[in-house]
Image: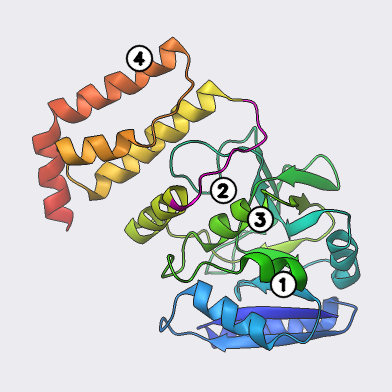
Amino acid sequence: MISIIVSSYLPEYFFALEKNIAETIGTSYEVIKIDNPGLMGICEAYNKGAQKAQFDYLLFIHEDILFKTKNWGDKLITHLNGQGSGIIGVAGSSYVPSAPSSWTVSEQYNFVNILQGDKKNTDSFLIHSTKRNREEVFAIDGVFMAVKKENYLQFRFNEAILKGFHGYDLDLSLRMSEKLQNYVVDDILIEHFSKGNRDKVWLDNNILVKQNINLSFRQKNDSETEKKAFLSFLYKYFEYYPINKKNILFTLRFYPKKLNFKDHTAIAKQYFKYIRYHKSINNKINTNN
């Protein structure tokens, strides 16, 4: 009943996952492995995998996970059959800021149900911030993204714009949230052996996502969250790009439209610091590059 699609480049993780799925899923399934040692972006890999899918329920997952819930397949199908359900995930956020950002916005809006580990497979800890069985969200983390095939076919992963391995989840889930309701659920638990990598490619793809999506989300404006997200964006952006007039004007494209006076002031002060110390910051960027 479930087509499980994996973009794979680490055989030891994939074989462990394949065995784990067989032992825990509790329903009919197929695993579609797309061998991908960096030869294609994950959008392309996932779209190729979806084309091969025989079943009506699609699950896109990372290979560095293990399922901890027994008979999770039936639970997932029940969630996907909920009226108006879009993407089902185990981590996501119910707020979308104006600035480029990952799905992780703030503790107030993040919903997660994951055992978080690392590549060394040690010291996993439970992150559990859901309060209900199904939390309504906009953005879904790409570690686990389930969707009905009929809904996937309306949107697909955006391989024309997004290359590499970042931004694909945010782009798909935000676009789908315009017509369907995405959820983070608390009755399917996975263990994830990676903490992610927020490098320049991550930043650039999240900028592309924001530039490509012009949607109004059903949310009450939160000035504090908008301020923090924008300052975080500025910090990350000026890690990789020099401080000059052109780049300052570019960042202002994402300036939040509704802020309290004190939050406007905080952002203005940060810009002043960047301009004041631009020579030393730019020298550091040149040295790192």
Residue 272 found in image quarter? top left
Residue 142 lies, with reference to residue 28, above or below; the image says: above
* Quadrant position of the N terminus in the picture: bottom right
Q: Earlier in the sequence, mark 3 or mark 4?
A: 3
How many numbered tags mark residues here? 4
| Mark 2 vs mark 1, CA separation in Å | 19 Å
| Mark 3 vs mark 2, CA separation in Å | 14 Å
From the image, tell me which residue sits under label 3.
Answer: 176
Q: Earlier in the sequence, mark 3 or mark 2?
A: 2
Tell me: 244 left or right of 134: left
SS of the residue under disc 1: strand
From the image, tell me which residue sits under label 4.
Answer: 265
Taking depth in this image into account, of 25 and 51 the one nearest to the observer is 51
Amino acid on which disc 4 is placed? Thr
Amino acid on which disc 1 is placed? Leu
From the image, tell me which residue sits under label 2.
Answer: 103
Q: Earlier in the sequence, mark 3 or mark 1?
A: 1
Residue 243 visible here = no
Q: Where does the image place residue 144, in percent across and percent down from the top left?
A: 67, 64
Amino acid on which disc 3 is placed? Met
SS of the residue under disc 2: loop
Residue 222 visible here = yes
| Mark 2 vs mark 4, CA separation in Å | 26 Å
SS of the residue under disc 3: helix
Q: Where does the image place residue 10, in percent across and percent down from the top left?
A: 52, 83
Labelled disc at residue 280: none
Q: Closer to the camera: disc 3 or disc 4?
A: 3
